[in-house]
Image (cartoon, coloured by chain):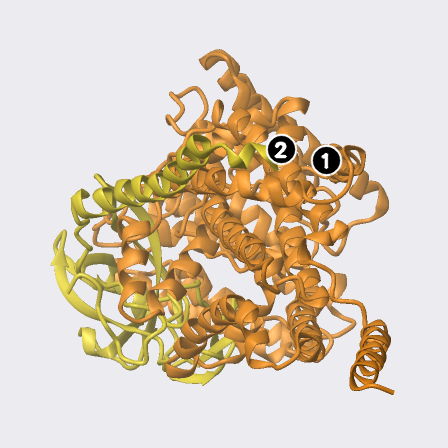
Chain colours: A yellow, B orange
Amino acid sequence: MSENTDPSRRDFLRVAVYGGVVLISAGVGAFAVSAPRVPAASGDLLPLGPLLRFKGLDTGMPLEARVTIQRRDGWRLRTRPQSVFILRSGEGATAAHYSAFSPVCPHAGCGVHAEAEEFVCPCHDARFGLDGARKSGPSPRDLDPLELEVREYRGEDWLYVRWQDFEPGRPERIARGA
Amino acid sequence: MSGSDIESELQAELAAEMSRRTSKLPPPPPEPSDDLVASLCLSALLALLALLAGTGVAMALGYAPAADDAVASLAWLELSFAGRVLRAAHFHASNLVVLLALATLGYMVWRGLYRRPGHWRWWRVAVLLLLLLAAGFTGQLLPFDQNALHGTQIRLGYLGDVPVVGPLIADFLRAGDEPGTAALARFYALHVLVIPALLLLLLRPLWRDARANGGQYVHFGAAGAVLALVLLAAFVVPAPLGMQGTLAEPYADARPEWYALPLYELLKLMPAGAAQTLMLVLGPLLFAVVVVALPFAERVAAEPERLKLPARIGLGVVLVAMLLLGALPLLQDSSDKRGWFASYDVEGLMLAMGSRNDALGPEDATLPPNAHLHAHDLRLLHERLIGVYPDDIDADARTKWDAWARDGASAALALFKAADSDAQQQALKDLRQACTSCHEAHEVDVIVNPLAQTQGGAALTPMFFDTALLASLEPRELRARGTKRIMDQARFRMRDILAHAGIVDDVTDRSKEQALVDLRHISERIASLWEDNAGSWFDEDKWQAWSREMIAAVDRLALATDREDLAERMAELGRTCEACHDGGDEPDMPIEWRYRNLLQ
């Protein structure tokens, strides 16, 4: 093609292409370096409800309770509801008689739901027993347990849960923001 | 004969032999730039890029990259037919461009067009595909509907599994605990500035590659054909837009784009951990190595032609494997009614509508600032409700059902478009009228207008129920007909009482005494139900025994001294319900109900 033989034009094109790639990479890089690191939320203790509610649970039957969690979104903090699975394991008014699981699948972070005998993640067919243990599917670890606590609130005992995010896809349990 | 004669004769013979041999040689392989099909593919690719740029710029004028605005801004754009076509054209072109780039690469392998001196073109097309995939990845989050948010959350999770650089890139893109407005800013900038700028740099060499063969008219023809195809598709099939994205609601139907289905299936089959990480790293790396190395491979093979067969076999194997792996999740989804084949059930839709309706608050009050988002969701939910019926309604009732669903959808649309608060109020009233009409026709006692908010934990009297009030109250008329609906009413009244006790958070329009009186009335009604319609499948003696137990449990409930006592008595009532449900559990009539469902 005759237009390519014009040396000044070819130089310009070369400079434009290489210069363009360098400039764009420099821009993205500069932002990545200069943007403030967003702090990750770490374990807030959140009220689940009066202990009365959970005393009525059949043992070994998960209840999908809701808490309000705070989420960091760049420069702002939002709140949103989050479900948590609560199981009662015995008679008694202490946190030790209950257990809680995060419904976030340890495989890829989808929402797990409770079926008759197991927890099922509908995204990639991961299955867990009601004790949170892996049964089948691609999950690298058991469901993530959450810490429970009984505290006094408005003059009565309330069940509190410590909400925690964990890194998905790892065999070991890594708490985010810890 | 002199020596020189012999020499000249030998030379002549040698020349003849040489010319005979050369003529027997196969013709030299075509120069890579001689291929018309590859050039036409590039022309079509360039035409699609131009269409994507044009529709992209047009959409950017109306799109707001913010978590609370993205869906609504696109829904607003799609109110006009032109807006719908615009977004659909961008959507279809983005799919076709990836398909065409993949096909071009495959064709180039088939014809050996990666061969030098055409290797730069081969690499350019590979880089083009890479940039297109990056544009797809960043573009998927932009609508910020349920599919976009949940899908990106999963993809960022996988990205974070890649050793060393993975978590850095994923955290940078996520810009917080989960994708939100900050993440949208990054995805948007990459999608509309960085990636198009890099594509622009690639444009001129690609343009030259395209023009290397064929006349102007064939190129116009190829470009025109794909543009016509995309526009036709855009007129017929709109781009999908779901409900406002939130991770608070689980979303089981998040599926990747079609070209990522083989990877999706592989990740599903493969247990997470070392093997999966290895695949996430080795897969793309292997692809990159093959793309880079192919032009050099012929140096290793003594003759270029020898490389052709292994390359073709490799291409075929990869193609078949991808098709099989891509088809598996589709087959599974179509049998499970999930993902792209998701079907909706009445109960799920009603629950989703209920939570959004509650968020809109009572009538004649100021609507929340994000009312338009709830309106968008409610419109979609009502549209999904059309054609989805409860099991027990006849053809006539179905027609009415659809009409109410349409009324609801158009009222929700009016709420979305409302110009002022009067229009908002009118739309909200219409919306609730559609719900109420349908509920009344199907005898469902559900409060559509949340008015009376109970104060949890307030009642701490010596006796939980006011006994004088209990004696003076009459039960409200029970409009529900049929076993299931009457059982529903019992559940609602139990829930009312739990809400008054502050054990659950809920809204009710009756006092705790009224709820108890109604519950007593309903349990008596349940006792007589066996004759009505339960007789065909339930043992009469058992039914009577359990009904008596239920009535006794309700009477014991009335004696509750305080909230704690009430909680225990309510759990006891719940157990009598469970006992009956378990007892009636026949293979063709399963009743799955647990007291814990009331506590959720």
Does B585 sit above or below residue B345?
A: below
The answer to the question of whether label 1 and label 2 lie on touching residues, with beta carbons closer than 8 A, is yes
From where the camera sits, is residue B200 visible?
yes
Q: Write down the residue under mark 1.
A: B227
Q: Which quarter of the picture shows residue B230?
A: top right
Q: Write down the residue under mark 2.
A: B51
Q: Is residue A117 left or right of residue B383?
A: left
User: Picture coordinates of residue B84 (x, y %)?
Assistant: 64, 29
Tell me the number on the disc at residue B508: none
From where the camera sits, is residue B446 visible?
no
Question: What amino acid type is highlighted by mark number 2?
Answer: Leu
**Residue at figure coordinates x 82%, y 83% from the top left:** B10
Judging from the image, mark 1 belongs to the subunit labelled B
Q: Earlier in the sequence, mark 1 or mark 2?
A: 2
- Quarter of the picture holding the N terminus of chain B: bottom right
Circle 2 — which element? helix
Q: Is residue B307 left or right of residue B459?
A: right
Q: Which quarter of the picture shows residue A105?
A: bottom left
- Quarter of the picture holding the C terminus of chain B: bottom left
Q: Is residue B326 left or right of residue B376?
A: right
